[in-house]
Image (cartoon, grey):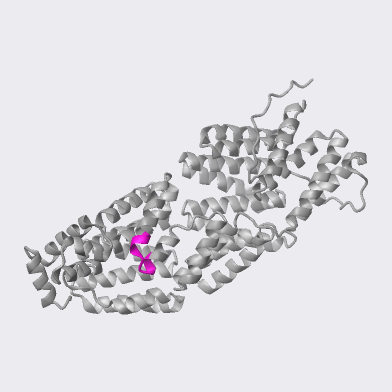
Amino acid sequence: MRKRRPRWPPLRASALCNNAPHGGMRMAGAKPPERQPQANAAALEAAAFETILAGREEAGLGQLEQAHEAYLAVNGVPGALHTATWLTILLMDRGDFARGGGWMAQLRRLADRYEGDCAELGYALLPVGLQQLGSGDPELALQTFARVIECAERFGDVSLATLGRLGTGQALVRRGAVTEGVSAFDEAMVPVTLGTVRPLVAGIVYCAVIETCYLLFDLRRAQEWTNALSAWWEAHPEVSRFRGQCLVYRAQLMRFHGSWSAAMDEAARAQEALSEPPHPALGSTLYEQAELHRLRGEFRLAEDAYREASRWGRHPEPGLALLRLAQGRTAAAVASIRRSLEEASDPVTRSRLLPACVEVALVAGDLEVARTASEELREIASSRQSDLLSAQAIEAEGAVLLYAGDAAGALHPLRTAWRQWQQLEAPYEAARVRVLLARACDALGDGDTAHLERDAAEWTFRELGATHDLASVKHAGPTSPAGLTSREVEVLALVAAGRSNREVALALVISERTVARHMSNILAKVDVPSRTAAAAYAREHGLI
């Protein structure tokens, strides 16, 4: 006789799924659930999941509720656990927390009252592990997912084991053990690529792993699994539930590799697929459209898209701060990126914001903030195996050196960053580095090389459709003598016109302390002892 198993911890909805039967007959004109045998309940459940996979989620939820009642009518507790778990998951996932909370309570009662042992109790542990992850306890979550895997192996349930390994990978990443977490993801993907898990499980694992790869800046794996997801989706035309998420991932990769028009088309298709009914990933595709509009110089459309993305739960940074910078609203960009960084505590979130912080701070003339952000980005990049983060950190280092007046010192990191962007096949990022290289060469008196770098950047911007960047390069021309930055030239011009530090600060919307720091840099770069001598230098070199 089996011992009564211990009570499970409280359950909570998650993005994971239960292992439900598929391929059963659809029930047309069925009798009331309480009079159906268990076989008919299983067939109705299978029909419900087919409906959900086909994208008709509301209808599938109704069928799933009927299947749940049918299982209870014949004391089929494992089947009732199936359906209660799925109803909780799907309702919570779509934001229907009231109904989802009701099914969560039902699931808890069923799990606590059941005397036997079955694989469905292993599935019931999945929401528990995710609750522990969400509350910031990855160590406890690892223990829970270990129990999930043990249950899966006891019952020979490949789908359950796959979901357990997925949860293990997520817990390891949250704990900071990124290498081990990625290894768990790779192991979870083996049965998915072999086709030995159910379609709904496969889709969930694909999307979760790809999303984590993006969060970890593991572009190689993200691209590999996105391509695999695309192939899987095309091989399963009956499955439309993951179509929108797949299109979002493809749009992100297309944008990164310079196919902006195709990326916009994919993002628009993703929006259509995710809108009816609204899916949580809708905010991501709206943000992706906003990024594309910003890069193409379509600022009004970008602003509208960032606003819509925010309404659907996607934080609009760092894109919105970069939009404000491109619009010339430097103070707004500074406030936005500063506030976002103050709220961000984990390294992953901060690493997504720091490159923009460096760019905004340099344009605002705050070299100290830019240098601090660059150093933090370098520390994060050194702790992670990410070519993307490495390229961003090295570029930031070179940009800070350039703006500090060390054009010679900036050349090596900028050349290294350009090569890394080239290897990653990121044409836009590579072109932006060439603009910085042109400025460095100008400051060193190498006008010919500067012209070649600037010409190459212009050609890339023109090919991509980066109209704002193209206009900026054309209007920028060579940098000023002595390696003065554009903001330093602005400060020097106002000082030469007789303005005090306070008046300069008000005119440029910066602090007096920042003006004083600019003046100190200017005096050092042009090698003069006083403001009066600096003003004379400005007139002599045609800077005013």
In the depicted view, which residue is nearer to us: 380 or 311? 311
**Residue 114 visible in image:** yes
In the depicted view, which residue is nearer to us: 140 or 172? 140
Residue at 59% x, 56% y: name it.
Answer: 281
In the depicted view, which residue is nearer to us: 109 or 115? 109
Which stretch appears magenta? Answer: 325-333
Horizontal placement of 224 versus 113: left or right?
left
> For the C terminus, which image quadrant?
bottom left
Q: Quadrant of residue 537?
A: bottom left
Residue at 25% x, 69% y: name it.
Answer: 486
Across and down, in percent, residue 532 comes to: 7, 67
Dominant SS type (magenta): helix
Across and down, in percent, residue 236 comes to: 72, 60
Q: Is residue 488 above or below residue 220?
A: below
User: Does residue 435 belong to the magenta stretch?
Assistant: no
Residue at 44% x, 50% y: name it.
Answer: 349
